[in-house]
Amino acid sequence: MIWARRDGRHRLLTFGHFADRAKRFANLLASLEVAAGESVVVLLPFVPEWWEVAAGALRAGVPFAPVPHGAGAAGLTAHATAATAGILVVDEAHLEAALAVRRACPSVRHVLCVGGLPRAETVNYQAAMHLEDPEHEPVVPRDPVLLTGTAPVSAHGHAELLREWAEPGLGWLDRRPDDLHWNGIPRETVAGFVFGLVEPWSAGAAILVGENGVDQDRTLLDRFPVTTVSAPGPWYTELAGPELRSLRHSALRRVLATGSQPDADVARVWYRETGLWIHPRPVHAEPPVGRTTFPEAY
């Protein structure tokens, strides 16, 4: 992963880093005695810990339920209730809301806080991860693995995730381990989860994550050698224009649109300015948040 920070600096995180963190988080879930039927509900900004928790939960066979960034206290409460959360993982900005959810939601037993100083009523994520064993035997994947939505919650199993992964016919992508993927599809949807984690990591490729989310997407495409872009159709419409010309001689080799597709004029602008056709990948509309699983134990 290349994590582009808000202050302009960036960090390079290896597969070894995420493998270590996934094993530690899987062991942490065992230490916290997450029960069958419970899930890990996550509300974090665009920080590496979101991907650490996702990989660790999938490795442990515990359903992963991401909350849309910006959903706030009401969204966190709705997702924790619908997903039968045993554990909440939040940043310091959402800590008070998470503690309120724990008091109101009987299934929630632990609140993990990423960042900030340790507090008696919470589990400090960094400290707890440091103490866990870096070795872990992956479990046989159980269903469901990814939870999305709240009314009602949608539970996605291993087979469904594999189908979502296979349906686009990704052989056309000419996937390479030295590729760099940028994903603009919301992380809390099945498509966003697949194209923002499962697809690139399964190919041995890196992902680019900006701390500001999609607000800095155009800047990131100019700054880093992105080879693959996956984004909702309207994103391409917003960026269509002469300024795209700088991407013609960039590393970008393929662009994938999901959901409602950009119209023919937008597609022609992209081709004229970049030399790239937008590859269509229609997906059904879905509410944010659900349960899914990694193709194999990470």
Image (cartoon, grey):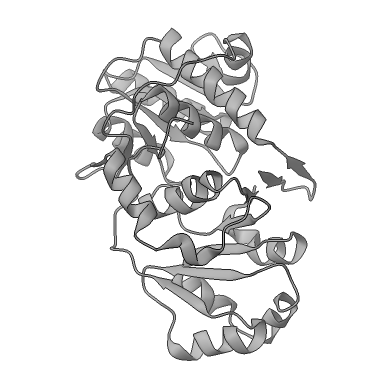
Quarter occupied by residue 296: top left
Residue at position x 40%, y 41% in the image: 67
Left or right: 97, with 158 as reference point: right
Q: Is residue 270 visible?
A: yes
Left or right for 277, reference 178: left
x then y, percent, for residue 94: 50, 32
The reply to whether residue 289 is visible in this rendering is: no
Q: Position of residue 249 (x, y in %)?
A: 76, 76
Q: Nearer the viewer, residue 298 or 128?
A: 298
Relative placement, left or right, of 234 versus 282 is right
Q: Would residue 57 be found to the left or right of residue 116 on screen?
A: left
The one nearer the camera, 168 or 260, is 168
Residue sticking out furthest to the right = 9
Residue positioned 58% across, 28% down in the render = 19
Look at the picture and state if 98 lies above or below 205: above
Position in image of residue 33 (x %, y %): 37, 9
Where residue 8 sits in the image (x, y, percent)? Answer: 79, 51
Residue in the picture at 38% in, 21% down = 139
